[in-house]
Amino acid sequence: MKPLALACLLLIPSTAAARTYTLPELISVTRKTNPGIAAAVQQTAAVQAQLLEARRSWMPTGELLSMVAPAPEIRCLTDLPLPSGTSEKEWRQEHCDRTNVYEASLNLRGVFTRTELRLVQPIYTFGKISAGVSAAESGIAASRSREQGVAAEVEMNVRRAYWTAKLSREILETINEGVSYLDEGQKTVEKDLAEGGGNATPADRYRLITVRADVDSRVLEATKLAQMARGGIRALIGPEAPKDIDVDSEPLAPLEVPPRTLEQYEDQAQRDRPEVRALGFLVEAKRSLADLERRKQYPDLVLMGTATFAFTSSIDNPKNAFANDPYNALSGGLAAAVRMPLDLGVKNARAVRLNAEAEEAFQRHREARGGITFEVQRAHADMIEAQQRMKVLKGGEKAGRTWMTSISQKFALGLAETKDLSDALVAYFQFRVRYLQAVYDFNIAAAALGRAIGGDVANSNP
């Protein structure tokens, strides 16, 4: 089976029942299902939780501890005589001067329970909370910008795969068109050689066989390109992508890019490029974190509240304000306090480190701005070159098509040589494929320029 026929068999089943997408549809579905974009969204959600944590630092913190345990029997003892009509237990607790403590470890007869609550409410933190909130807010903005950058990179890859699929299809259609002329030429040469008439020679046969081999190899290359493009589209959509997938049937055409100066593109890149904005927000977040670490060396003004309840069924409760009875208690307290860390040397070193990291982020930001300017210049130069190449090759393609048609007609009438036919076929193939490649290069360069400036050059305004 000839390679062209094989290519058709490979392509037809995959496209006949395939789910076809336009470029906007591909971009839309990929934004919804691409795992990389989904992961970036969850990363932003995690940073948003950090902001919630920072804002809730104003809320009171503390600890609740509640326990239950077996307890011994501990009785109060007194030498005072018990008045008539008085409860023995109450009398012992009111006049307790000693206990039967020597029996404590041997006499587990009751249940002990104790609940303690301690709360600390910040009043003034010398800017710690505001610095933490500022760092989290900048972190969210940076994460969202990174999320946009991930989506833009995925979109760029979608555009590349989409136009690659169209390029491979156009090449196969071009080859299919030119092969009909080649088939007619080979039939004519074989007929002349078989009948012994005409001007055909064995060299003419080999010339056309050579052209056929070149055409067949291009068919295999284009077929592989189409399969790789469809596989790339499925990978970008994610595991939910249809097994059979293809792009719409519209021909490969150059994008319409409004005229803009290089300076306008450079200005937009500095303003809108997601990576530039992400680094800018990262610098702000790092500086806020360094400020937070510096402020951690300052004290906190807080309100402290405590509450305690303890009860033991088998232990007496002496009625004495100066007695510390851990087994039977009901108390509470509220106090203003100053809370201050004493590891100031460690915190100062951390602040210095975070300041250095903030400065590093600032220099990375400057470096990225310069690199993105160069990226814009390179993508712009590629787009202009591809645009000019399209214009040149468009004329060559038209001339090649006219040449091929004219020579084919003359060859059929015996008025042209086999060499003329092969030269015309090769010229048409080359110019047509090179023109399609130029269109593809122009669209890719325009997409790369849009990626570099953080927008769509085909639809953006200065």
Image (tube, rainbow, N blue to C red):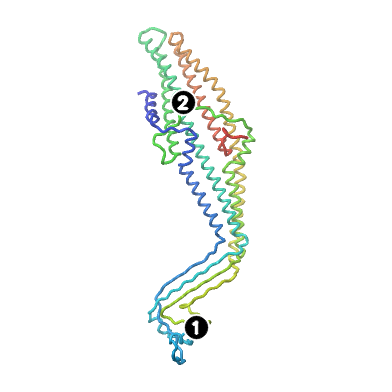
Tell me where residue 183 sits by quadrant: top left
Residue occupying image coordinates x 47% and y 92%? 80
Q: Find out whether the residues at labels 1 and 2 contact each other: C-beta distance under 8 Å.
A: no
For disc 1, the marked residue is 319
Q: Earlier in the sequence, mark 1 or mark 2?
A: 2
Q: Quadrant of the C terminus?
A: top right
Q: Position of residue 76 (x, y in %)?
A: 45, 85
Q: Position of residue 125 (x, y in %)?
A: 61, 62
Counting every numbered tag in the picture gives: 2
Instruction: Name which residue type carries label 2.
Output: Glu
Seen from this angle, which residue lies furthest top?
Answer: 197
Establish if 28 lies above or below 328. above
For disc 2, the marked residue is 170
Establish if 153 lies above or below 294. above
Tell me where residue 172 sits by quadrant: top left
Residue occupying image coordinates x 48% and y 86%? 94
- Which numbered mark, 1 or 2, is in the foreground of this view? 1
Q: What number is the disc on residue 257? A: none
Q: Position of residue 168 (x, y in %)?
A: 45, 28
Tag 2 secondary structure: helix
Tag 1 secondary structure: loop
Q: Position of residue 456 (x, y in %)?
A: 56, 35
Instruction: Name which residue type carries label 1.
Output: Lys
Q: Residues within 10 Å of mark 2 (few under 14, many from 20)?
A: some
Is residue 264 toward the left or the right of residue 246 in the image?
Answer: right
Compute the Cα span from label 1 to label 2.
Answer: 100 Å
Residue occupying image coordinates x 53% and y 55%? 50
